[in-house]
Amino acid sequence: MKFETEYIEKLAKIIADNELTEISLEDGEQAITIRKDLPEVVTAGVPLPPAAPVAAAAPAPAAAPSAPAVAAEEEKKGKAIVSPMVGTFYSKPSPDADQFVKVGDTISAGDTVCIIEAMKMMNQIESEFDGKITEICVSDGDPVEYGQPLMYVE
């Protein structure tokens, strides 16, 4: 597959029309990632870098929470594990399996805490730190946005 300009423009239109934030494709040695600009998200008082701009895609309107409100909320609940992408949250590997984690569970860095399905791909989300789950913010099957807190760890 050759990534031609017309094909790239169609992908950008799909992003804009379907309120997606990112599309990534690979074909052999070729790869392309198209991202929509997003407002800056503040996590634990440290701003995350904004996504790279996309040609022909309008940014999604979203209200970013104020830094003091987010910092106070996170101090109370612990560190946030945030969604690295737009998709659907799944708390267990299959419908008949147990949840990856529950409130009160102790986890280690690298432990799988959930799955985010994006574009028919199941992406395992791993914890970046050790601690105890204090809150799970989304329910199984809920849609999630980039940067949205999924759970808090103390």
Image (spheres, rainbow, N blue to C red):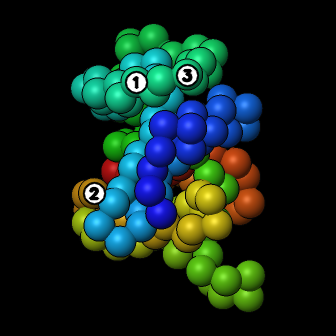
Residue drawn at (67%, 83%) of the image: 94
**Residue hosting label 3:** 56
Q: Residue 106 got which mark?
A: none
What is the distance, in whole Å, between disc 1 and disc 3 at their CAs?
A: 9 Å
**Residue hosting label 2:** 128
What is the distance, in whole Å, between disc 1 and disc 2 at their CAs?
A: 27 Å
As helix, strand or loop, the secondary structure at mark 1 comes to loop
Instruction: Pinpoint residue 127: horizontal percent, then vertical percent.
Output: 34, 61
Say whether residue 148 is left or right of residue 84.
Answer: right
Residue furthest out toward the bottom: 96
Residue drawn at (36%, 56%) of the image: 31
Instruction: Pinpoint residue 113: horizontal percent, then vertical percent.
Output: 46, 67
Amino acid carrying label 2: it is Glu
Q: Earlier in the sequence, mark 2 or mark 3?
A: 3
Q: Residue 62, located in which quarter of the rendered image?
A: top right
**Residue hosting label 1:** 53
Residue drawn at (27%, 57%) of the image: 128
As helix, strand or loop, the secondary structure at mark 2 comes to loop
Amino acid carrying label 3: it is Ala
The answer to whether residue 17 is visible is: yes
Q: Please say if 8 is above or below 40.
A: below
Amino acid carrying label 1: it is Pro
What is the distance, in whole Å, between disc 2 and disc 3 at their CAs?
A: 34 Å
Q: Nearer the viewer, mark 2 or mark 3?
A: 3
Instruction: Pinpoint residue 66: horizontal percent, then vertical percent.
Output: 45, 11
Residue drawn at (56%, 38%) of the image: 6
